[in-house]
Amino acid sequence: MTRPRPTPLPAAFLQSRAMLRPRPLMPEHVRLLLQALIDARSCAELTEARWELLLRAARAARLLGTVATRVEAAVPFAALPVFVQRHLAAGRVEARFRRQKTLHLLATIEPHLRATGARTILLKGAACIVEGLPAAAGRLPADVDVMVPRRVLDGLEQSLREEGWEFEKNDPYDQRYYRAWSHELPPLQCAGQALELDLHHAILPPLGRLRADTEALFASAVAIPGTPYHALCPADQVLHAAAHLFQDSDCTGRLRDLVDIDALLRHFAATNADFWPTLTERARHHRLLRPLWYALAAARAWLHTPLPSEIVAWLAREAPPRPMRALFGALATRTLPPLDPDGAPALRDVIAGKLLEARAAWLRMPPPLLAYHVANKWWRSLGSTRAAAAGD
Amino acid sequence: MLIAEVAPAQLRGELAACGVAIDCGAARVRVHSDVPELADLLRVVYRGYERSDAAGACDVAVRLRRARGLRRWVRAQVELLIDGSREMEPFPADTPLPLLEWGMNYALATRLNCHLLLHAGVVERNGRAVVLPAMPGAGKSTLTAALALGGFRLLSDEFGVVRFGDAHLLPLLRPVALKNESIDAIARLSPDAVIGPRFPKTHKGTVAHLAPAVEHVHARHTPAAPALIVFPRFVAAGGVEIQPLPRARAFARLAVNSFNYEIVGPDGFDALGRLVAASDCYELRYGDLTRAVQHIGRLLDAAAARG
């Protein structure tokens, strides 16, 4: 297939005065994916060649389930080309599987959580699924994130390990890294479980530059009716996602994180009258105003998330300095979208991803610790290269 | 025009530029490549396939390319990108076709979750399917190839693609990967067998690919109704020994050996139940390919007479 030349974005993108807007000339696969996420009805008009590119981009972005759910709700399924039906059906099936596996994992560990006697907060995908939020529709979680108070963490870890849960990363450095400097234990795995379990005691690294008020997170958490679990309050759920938006160590193809934020914002804004004032208030309290600013600006520019006028005014008022904004916008544009499914990544996109990773590491740890961590990783990667060469 | 009829230079050009679409029935794959010898390989093992319009939609796109950097020149390698990402380790540069075929298997096994995917060979006669599930060392590919050369239509040597709802088997037709001794066994069996070049020293030993017959390629959009499930086991000294298998056992073994039984959940449970209910189930120990093929023919006739 000959690749179409990149086409200009729809006028709406260019007219939106939002900061952090996507490049005006954006690769076709990204344009198609955004358009499908913003307005799935537009998919009714797509040619088969466009569909192919869209479906492959959606799969690369781990958004096939989301796209499938939205398209099926917006377009008569039977009218779609047969090969499109195949992939949408596959996306739906995969999302059903991962939802089922999330619930299965929670059912398995529930007695252990109950035995701690402490409040258990579900985070991210697990929370959306158990709460039944629209953000859960079509989601493809790879792990289940659970937060408990730090004081019960050791006991919980012990009882899970007696039950057969094991750490995937078991070398002493990784163990020490997670335990001393991270807000979660290394991922736990168990035979018979398709997903990993991440046990958190906070939502951000304890020594990082961004820190949320963990006690306030627990205190304001809301019970999920009919379950023994809590979820973060709506504002905190959004702030958690925002704090991680450009912070995770793998900073490529993270569009799905933004899709989450968009879905949470739309849902909470529609169901909680005082959601927006609470959101900025909580952001101030947790000192997460800057991550919130980037998240809202990016969600509005990329996914047309509707924001009330006072929030738009707040965005304008609280905007970071122009060079920061420009740099961040450029990096986000290169790293949010999935890789081109027809080619290898361009060098400049790889570099942008590395820069964002470096920034994320910078935010996670104080400089001496970061230097130590980087040196250690480098030394160990050298070791594994040598071992591979020796075994070759 | 068939792929075998396209001039090598032209096919090379198409592989490098817009890619070549291969319609396998249940899925279409687009292949891009800058590996010069691939065109000649495809002209042999995909000889009966239409050079279908490359602009048509494909389910997966793979790009087989010469490795970048040092590995382009020193102990050269080829690598495979599936939808733009490198999901498999590179192979030595002299084994491009095995990498392409394994990569396509991997890509299809992880993407076609709209069907139940059994790890099995499938052939058909008079619209009735024979499913030959793969167990380690079972000789599934060898027996599937022998059946395909012995009056049965080949649907797949790797994937039993079971449609949700009616449990009919969909062709996912690709060259049959023959390993080690079975290459000669199949070459001896039929003078019609078109087998591609041998690739020694792959991680599964020597591999060569049997090209599907043109008539089978033509019928790659025609499904087959379930009728017979045979669990083969190759026993070097034996003749042919057959034993009925309880349906519940057959169900459990097929489920365990499926690529995606767990993922497809209730749809897969339902489809597998229908498949097994509509099929006679046997275990077959064989040492003689020709007699095994005749025996399976008789079992299929018996299943047809019953149903």
Image (tube, rainbow, N blue to C red):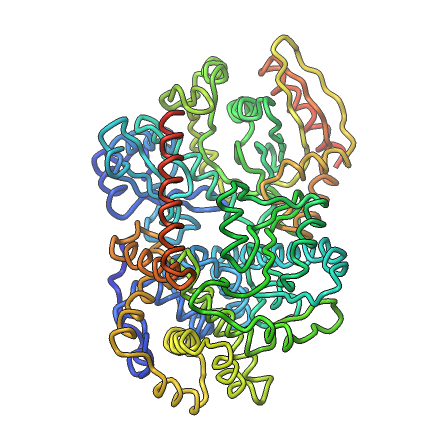
Q: Quadrant of residue A350?
A: bottom left
Any part of residue A215 in sight: yes
Q: Locate residue A5, reporting x and y percent.
A: 24, 62
- Numbered label tally: 0
Residue at (27%, 36%) from the top-left corner? B66
Residue at (56%, 57%) from the top-left corner? A184
Residue at (67%, 14%) from the top-left corner? B240
Nearest to the observer: residue A30 or residue A299? A299
Nearest to the observer: residue A259 or residue B27? A259
Q: In which quarter of the image is residue A246?
A: bottom left
* Residue A300, above or below B30: below
Q: Locate residue B1, reporting x and y percent.
A: 31, 40
Q: Look at the image and tell me in which quarter the C terminus of chain A lies.
A: top left
Any part of residue B163 in sight: no
Nearest to the observer: residue A75 or residue A269? A269
Left/right of residue B273 with respect to residue B124 in the rendered view: right
* Residue A75, above or below B72: below
Q: Locate residue B185, reporting x and y percent.
A: 50, 14
